[in-house]
Image: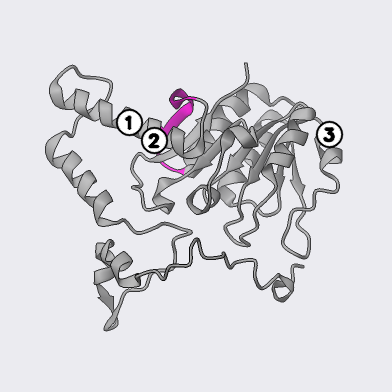
Amino acid sequence: MLDIDSLPKTAAVSPARNAETRDVETVRADFPILATSRGGKPLTYLDNGATSQKPRAVIDIMTRYYETYNANVHRGVYAISEQATAAYEAARQTVASLVNAPEPESIVFTRNTTEAINLVAYSWGRRNVQAGDAILTSAMEHHGNLIPWQIVAEERGARLLHLPVDEQGRLDLSNLDHFLAQGVKLVAITHMSNVLGTINPVAEITRRAHAAGALVLLDGAQSVPHFPVDVQNIDCDFIAFSAHKMVGTDRHWRIVRAALRA
């Protein structure tokens, strides 16, 4: 059993990005909801790991969209449809730049991280995982990166394996190669745990998985909002993350990168 008291006390504390003192009230003023109160006190919101609040700039641009060029993308040759399409594709380029994706076309928009993982599970998984194969996850996965693989494994007659977590809340990689040698087709692993805050060595895991002939899917729902992520440096095959956890909207900004090798 994991002893929470044994975890490093500095694990959840990040050093300041610079020496300047942040003007908290200026930051709060960017978020309209933080001007409201609960129980007679200004709202304090700490659940950003689940979903972040939206700043005025995001709310304004979404309002402007609905008020001035709301239309289906890729399906019209009239002015506002072309404007909506251009904005949509610009967002794809922005997201590609954010994670250093090799090309904008590798970005696929879905409704949320779980749907993105399900998209991979029910398209690539159902096509490529066969009876006797294995899917490797870990004991620290969010259920959004566990249940889809449970379903695929059951449907395809595959095995679902789990990397253990040690007493420090870190993945135990001592037997990773042993697991990979058991016919693993895919490693589905979280980049950063939503419970422990553990940041996994995903570049190393990906390198060893590829050497064993397995692909890698990363759940980046917590990592991408918190620190720079370079998918080309990691060399993962899929990564799923959600803009609604990093002050974006939750309608069409949640994405999965699906860049399979030829």
Mark 3 neighbour class, 10 Å CA radius: few under 14, some 14 to 19, many 20 or more: some
Contact? badges 2 and 3 (CB < 8 Å)? no
Name the spot of residue 89 as percent of width and height, x first. 33, 28
Report which quarter residue 31 is drawn in: bottom left
Considering only order in the chain, which callout, 1 or 3, is on the residue closer to the N terminus? 1
**Quadrant into which the N terminus falls:** bottom right
- Location of mark 2 (residue): 94
Residue 5: percent from left, percent from top: 71, 76
Residue shown at the point (44%, 65%) measured from the top left: 47
Find the residue positioned furthest to the bottom.
Answer: 40
Residue, disc 3: 182
Can residue 8 be seen?
A: yes
| Residues at circles 1 and 2 in contact by the CB criterion of under 8 Å | yes
Image x and y of residue 43, in percent? 32, 74
Q: Which residue lies under the disc numbered 1?
A: 90
Left or right of 246 on screen, residue 227: right
Q: Residue at x 61, y 60 (%)?
A: 197
**In the picture shown, does residue 235 fall above or below 6?**
above
Tell me the SS state at disc 3: loop
Based on the picture, tell me whether residue 111 belongs to the magenta stretch: yes
Magenta-colored span: 103-112
Q: Quadrant of the C terminus?
A: top right
